[in-house]
Amino acid sequence: MSDEKNRATAAAILPLVGGAANVTSVTHCMTRLRLGVADRSLVQDAALKALPAVLGVVEDDTYQIVLGPGTVARVTPEFAALVEAGRDAPPAPPEPPATADPTGPALSTAEELAAQGAALKARQKARNATPVKLFLRRIADIFVPLIPALIGCGIIAGLNGLLTNFGLLPALVPALAATASGFMSLIAVFVGYHTAKEFGGTPVLGGAVAAIIVYAGVAQVSAFGQQLSPGQGGVLGALGAALLAVQVEKACRRYVPEALDVLVTPTVTVLVSGLVTLFGLMFVAGEVSTAIGTCANWLLAHGGAAAGFLLGGLFLPLVMLGLHQALIPIHTTLIEQQGYTVLLPVLAMAGAGQVGAALAVYVRLPGNRSIRATVRSALPAGFLGVGEPLIYGVSLPLGRPFVTACVGGAFGGGFVGLFNQLGTTAGATAIGPSGWALFPLLKGNQPLGATLTVYAAGLLVGYAVGFLATYFFGFGKQALTDLNAATEPVAAGG
């Protein structure tokens, strides 16, 4: 029955994105179906948002349909199969979404907010199309395919920790430890593979060069007067090594005769990139990785409350600016070094502030059925850390509630940071989930119960402050009057 539901969802989405002929690529991340589309004008945004399974849409370098964790992993293969089957067929004409009264005097307020949110996204996307931000986006895309493995291995590591602490199933503990740690021990190879793929090189060559970093034999190599150690430089070293390999490979393709290409290009690429990695990149990346871990721990240990306040309050604006993508390699480096990232639980408080703000919007607008319906439909995803429907459908277009949501995130982040400063660290063993979905991935320097309590209390602080700040300061008197006067019927899916 579940397979039928996923196929039905995929079948409903396909004509609304212009049919199979209009889809150029299909992939997914933790929560979103990411599509490349040939003709953007064929995509029916309003109709997609009206589908019960769709939590929202985001237009970035790809067209992204928010389906939520779990659902997206099941719908994507069904959608890809439909695209493959219908590739040569003409796109089916999309059906327009059912609306309350298209001939009425005005759109519902939720529709106006959605349109304004889409316009804000489009303007922000144009501002974000700078070389630095586009580069950061490509770096983020390297790590997106790794997130499911990080989550799976992180949860297994947490389960193994519980079994160890309670002395249960001792014979199973070593097997679970190997299962949880195997991926992390070779994550550099996967990073190298996807880096080369993202930047136009041969993926396996990127993986081959990055594999040098985790090879045990590097312990016999000296660089800068020091013996190297397996894994030194970690994901940052793998990233740099694979980027270098791509450049060497492209240079070889330009100058090596075609008849010799199959022999010379891969050999020169691995040899040159490998030697530079061994005698330069591993040492430099190792120093940078160590500095990242030291700085992150020092920041929260010494300035925990203030640092958490700033990080939690600024994360939503960072997301809008596209600068949050620079944090992904940092998270991964921290997980690789100490088993968890101390930054993610702090940053997750931004989502808590957003949820609190949305609840206040719901309470303050009893006369606006349209916006209240949007909040109701988006809140479950918001509690699980999927914030786009609330951000772009409610708070950002309204203006002030976006600011007060940031205030809620700041206080939640400050709370988690304060406890870090007091000696109770809350970290996450994987990146991707936030909100309630982060609970199975929590880990810290204290017993698990203490870590869970700190994170849960931080969420409550974020909810409460986001709610109160929005309730009292989220609306001007005139705006509150105007919004509560919008009592028209709710559009389908609104």
Image: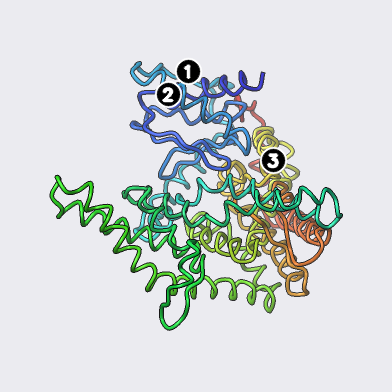
Instruction: Residue at 69% x, 37% y: name it.
Output: 372
- Count neighbours of disc 3 (C-alpha within 10 A) and say few if under 14, some if 14 to 19, many if 20 or more: many
- Where the N terminus falls, by quadrant? top right
415 to the left or right of 101: right
Q: What is the x, y in percent for residue 319?
A: 53, 55
Mark 2 against mark 1, which lies toward the viewer? 2
418 to the left or right of 102: right
Q: Nearer the viewer, residue 148 or 173?
A: 173
Query: Which residue position holds label 3?
Result: 379
Which picture quadrant has residue 243? bottom left
Amino acid type at mark 2: Val
Amino acid type at mark 3: Leu
Amino acid type at mark 1: Glu
Q: Which mark is residue 209?
A: none
CA gap, disc 3 and disc 1? 27 Å
Q: Earlier in the sequence, mark 2 or mark 3?
A: 2
Query: Which residue position holds label 2?
Result: 83
Q: What is the x, y in percent for residue 226?
A: 46, 80
Q: What is the x, y in percent for residue 115?
A: 50, 38
Instruction: Residue at 57% x, 61% y: name it.
Output: 331
Q: Earlier in the sequence, mark 3 or mark 1?
A: 1
Mark 2 against mark 3, which lies toward the viewer? 2
Query: Which residue position holds label 1?
Result: 95
CA gap, disc 2 and disc 3? 31 Å
Tag 2 secondary structure: helix
Q: Nearer the viewer, residue 271 or 449?
A: 271
Tag 3 secondary structure: helix
200 to the left or right of 343: left
